[in-house]
Image (tube, grey):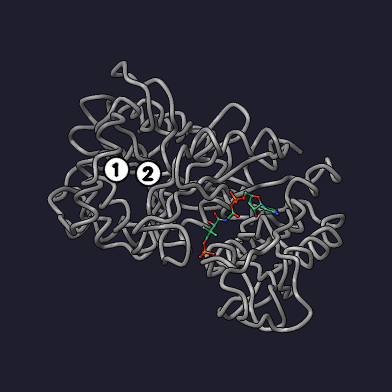
Amino acid sequence: MDITKRILLGVCGGIAAYKSAELVRLLRKQNVEVRVVMTNSAMEFVTPLTFQALSGHSVHSKLLDSDEENAMGHINLARWADEIIIAPASANSIAKFAHGIADDLLSTVILATQCKVTLAPSMNQAMWLNPAVQENITLLMARGITILSPDHGSQACGETGPGRMIEPAIICQKILQAEHGSLNGLSVLISAGPTREPIDPVRYITNRSSGKMGYALAEAAKGAGADVTLVSGPVALVPPEGIKVLAVETAQQMYEKVLSCSAKANIYIGSAAVADYSPVAELNKIKKKDANKILTLLKTRDILASVAESHEALFTVGFAAETEHLETYAKDKLVRKKLDMVAANWVGRADGGFDKENNAVTVFWPGGQQDFPMMAKRNLAQQLIQLIAQHYHEKN
Ligand code: PMT
């Protein structure tokens, strides 16, 4: 069978290095040609012989290797690869990649390459959550490097939390899915932006949503091969190309549009900040004759819960915008609204959430969760779409 892709696998020092041997085996089974670069620390955990036997090629580890033609191994390797995967990516190597340090073969290849780079970090949970690591991750993502966020769970060091490298089978699946279009042939319906609830003909109640998160999700879903319909509240954004945009204003209009499109959709992502209450609107402009004015607010219909209820086969993803008890409230929404997933974000803070360029979320699904650190909404959207695609395919 023909080789489908050339992947350079970088292995850093960490207990998860043994799992990367399995990753080589899985990639080879998919006709991917794999070359391996190991750091000195990686070779303390697993011998190069293991990777040599599995990849069918000698392992590269020296920056100045006299056996390589012109002693330019790093340039040759950087040019050879269609894609570079670093698994496990240690905190130390992540810091080197973020700051352009080139003191070994792997960090030099990363500086020299122009191909897609994906990192699967693995480290102790406190190290992963350390602001130094998170800032390096944010820097790398801003430069277009894909991060496969680590799993949450018990760790080799005896602690529990985020930091376990995701399983080789999932890494392999993500690499091949990204290649083939993880949402090819699927119809994705997304709601975005705020709603406007009229008080009278000239005034309304709204919220701070800019639509950036929802528009980024629409672009990422389109990029993953989906046919995308975006039901959008009033925003000041240019819709991504190739996406059907249905403009609405009120929560009731959004309800009607989403419900009418949901029967044809495979996935619904509710990223809109829909008003929970709508005033009983006055027909004419309210005059300021009273000292105080009391508005009567009526509860709006829950769009997300309604689509989840009426189309059981639809894969439903909600957002939870919280100012307190993020996990408790998000998990409650997951169960109460009968969702497949919920992406919980903090709002009302200095960074992330409403009307910001960046966002961080924790995604919950029945029996699992995954943290996505603060990053540009476009990068976050791409990662969320890959996670949604993976769970959609597991369910269907
Ligand atoms: O638009 P940006 O400026 O980029 O900001 C992004 C965001 C913060 C708005 C986005 O990330 C986000 O959190 N969106 C959901 C906001 C929200 O309304 O959250 P909620 O916790 O109140 O609602 C929970 C879920 O129910 C949401 O998926 C919401 O779309 C849905 N909902 C709520 C009320 C309602 N009547 N119908 C609904 O479908």
Q: Mark 1 points at which residue?
A: 37
Res 134 visible = yes
Q: Residue 316: horizontal and vertical position, in percent?
A: 71, 46
User: Distance from label 1 to label 2 (Cα)?
Assistant: 6 Å
Please state which amino acid type lies under the numbered disc 1.
Val
How far from the left and from the top, in percent, is residue 114?
A: 35, 65
Left or right of 115? Residue 244 is: right
Please tell me whether residue 40 is drawn above or below residue 99 in the rendered image: above
Asked whether the residues under the numbered discs 1 and 2 touch, taking CB atoms below 8 Å apart as contact, a structural biologist would say: yes
Residue ID at (45%, 54%): 347
**Left/right of residue 196 with respect to residue 263 in the rendered view:** left
Residue indicated by mark 2: 9
- Is 377 located above or below residue 135 in the figure? below
Q: At label 2, which amino acid type do we have?
A: Leu
Q: Is disc 1 placed on a helix, strand or loop?
A: strand
Q: Can residue 66 be seen in this view?
A: no
